[in-house]
Structures are given as structure tokens and as C-alpha cells.
Image (cartoon, helix red, strand yellow):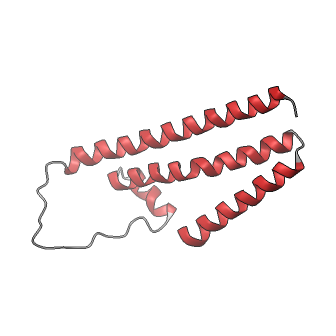
Amino acid sequence: MTTYTDRAMESAIGRMLRIGVAISAGTVLIGGLIYLSSAGTAVPDRHHFTREKVVFDSFAGILRGVGSLNAASIIQLGLLLLIATPVIRVVFCVVGFARQRDCLYVTVSAIVLLILLYSLFQYGG
């Protein structure tokens, strides 16, 4: 492990995190602008409560909503991208440490990745 390799890895991970957050923020912003342009003039009816339809029950449902330019689906996609950013960071760490041939950190990062994926699929799906 040389200092240059560590710095290159840190730089790549930092760049990936900035790009991931920027893409997710841009996606949420686009969804918010679409929402405000379409629903910003509606007057809420506070006399009758009606439950909203569940459209975010699956990733496929979110993508269908994004395909039809549903503002809430676009916002939800942006939030999913934000959640995926640290998971991708851990994947970057596993690959980076494997390239450095650092078995201890590969093992620790892989365990962290497995825990993240388990919790996402166990409680998120």
C-alpha cells in the first residue's frame, strides 16, 4: 500500500460520493419542480381525508411512475439514488482494497456490504 494508491482511492471515492449526491439532488429537484408546476395551484380539501394510493411498493412501480413523469415517483427515485450512494461507496472500497491486496480491509468492507444489502432487502423489500 503506497500513499499514492491510498490518495487515489480516497479521491475516487470522494468524487463518486459528490457525483451520487449531485445526481440524486438533481433528480429530487426535477421531481419537485414538476410537482410544483402541476399541483402547486390545487387547493387542498381538509374536510375529507382520503388515503393516497401506494405506488412506491416496488422499484418497478417507481420506474413506471418515472416513465409517465409522475412527480412523486421522480422524487422517490432521487431518494433511492441517495440511499444507494453509500452502498456504492462500500463497493468501491471492496474493489479498491482488493486492488491494493489488503485482505483485512477487503474482508471488513465485504462484511459491511453484506450487512447493508441484507438490511436493505430484509426491511426495504
Q: Is residue 120 left or right of residue 36?
A: right
Image coordinates for residue 120, horizontal then vertical, percent: 59, 64
Q: Nearer the viewer, residue 61 or 25?
A: 25
Tell me: 94 left or right of 104.
left
Using the image as rendered, state which of residue 39 and residue 11 is in the foreground: 11
Q: Quadrant of residue 99?
A: top right
Spot occupied by residue 51 in the image (x, y as percentages of width and height): 26, 73
In the rendered view, does 124 fall on the left or right side of 43? right
Residue at point 14%, 54% (across, down): 42
The outermost residue toward the top is 4
Question: Residue at the spot x=13%, y=49% of the render?
Answer: 41
Looking at the image, residue 92 sits to the left or right of residue 62; the answer is right
Give the residue at x 18% y 48%.
40
Please say if 102 is above or below 123. Answer: above
Residue 25, by quadrant, is top left
Q: In the rendered image, which quarter contains the N terminus?
A: top right
Residue 36 lies, in percent from the top left, at 24, 46
Establish if 13 lies above or below 112: above
**Picture quarter with the C terminus:** bottom right
Q: Is residue 125 visible?
A: no
Answer yes or no: is residue 28 visible: yes
- The foreground one among 27 and 83 is 83
Give the image location of residue 39, x and y in percent.
20, 51
Total label count? 0
Which residue shows up at 33% across the image and 51% down it? Answer: 71
